[in-house]
Amino acid sequence: YTFSMKFTLYKPNAKNTGSAFTFDATKDNSGKSVLFVSMIQQYSWDDQKKTGSFKQNAKNPDKSTTIKLTEVEAGEFISSFKTRIPFLGFHKTQEKTTVIKLTPWDKNRTIKNKNVQGEWTETNYKTPAWGFTITKDSSQYFKLPMEAGEAEALAILLEYYIKESFTAQALAYKKTPQNSYQKPAPKPSSVEEDDDDVPF
């Protein structure tokens, strides 16, 4: 069967600083499970319709980009959704550095209700929300505000990707003769630079 799950969030705003993010969990050409995050900066804002447009920036490399998240980074997102602890990660190549940041914040939500006298009352709640920011080379910024329901939906996609990735690894291990199976070498992580406070 084909493994594929996609979740897109469009977040335009009147300041024309919004972004559209697509989380695409799929398989690459070799059959490996991958998670791509594609981003497009907002192109314009229609004040009468209160809508934003992104399409014109989709093919512009200065206004759009794609990154790949690892299973551990996907796990960090799920953890941040549960614990409300920020996550900061880095993707470094010789030419470029991409900074991935997920920051929890509290959003005000106002609910209107009619009381027994038939009068409208307002109740304010603090609801969990997150700010997801991708910064490329300190010059390109893609920002996505996420609400509680959006985070819950994204968490399901992230869990699906992690499970599919491990299932694919298990199937590959089964198909490989045991005497020729090469244990994968651990990859160096640039997510946590300082391990001085690790309690072991």
Image (spheres, grey):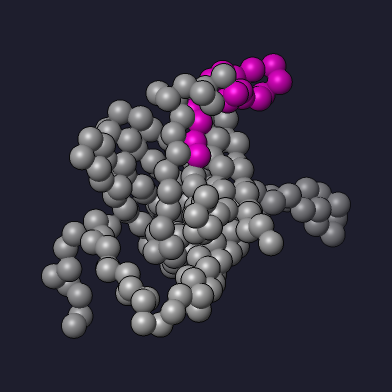
Q: Position of residue 159 (x, y in %)?
A: 55, 66
Tell me which residue sits at (49%, 36%) in the image: 39
Any magenta on residue 91?
no
157 on left or right of 193 = right
Nearest the viewer among 60 and 120 is 60
Q: Is residue 48 above or below residue 79?
A: above
**Residue 195 image-quadrant placement:** bottom left
Name the residue furthest left. Answer: 196
Q: Position of residue 23 (x, y in %)?
A: 55, 47
Q: Residue 171, can we see it? A: yes
Q: Is residue 180 above or below residue 5?
A: below
Q: Quadrant of the C terminus?
A: bottom left
Q: Position of residue 31 (x, y in %)?
A: 53, 58
Q: Is residue 39 above or below residue 155?
A: above
Tell me which residue sits at (49%, 45%) in the image: 37
183 on left or right of 125 = left
Magenta range: 38-55
Q: Position of residue 148 (x, y in %)?
A: 58, 56
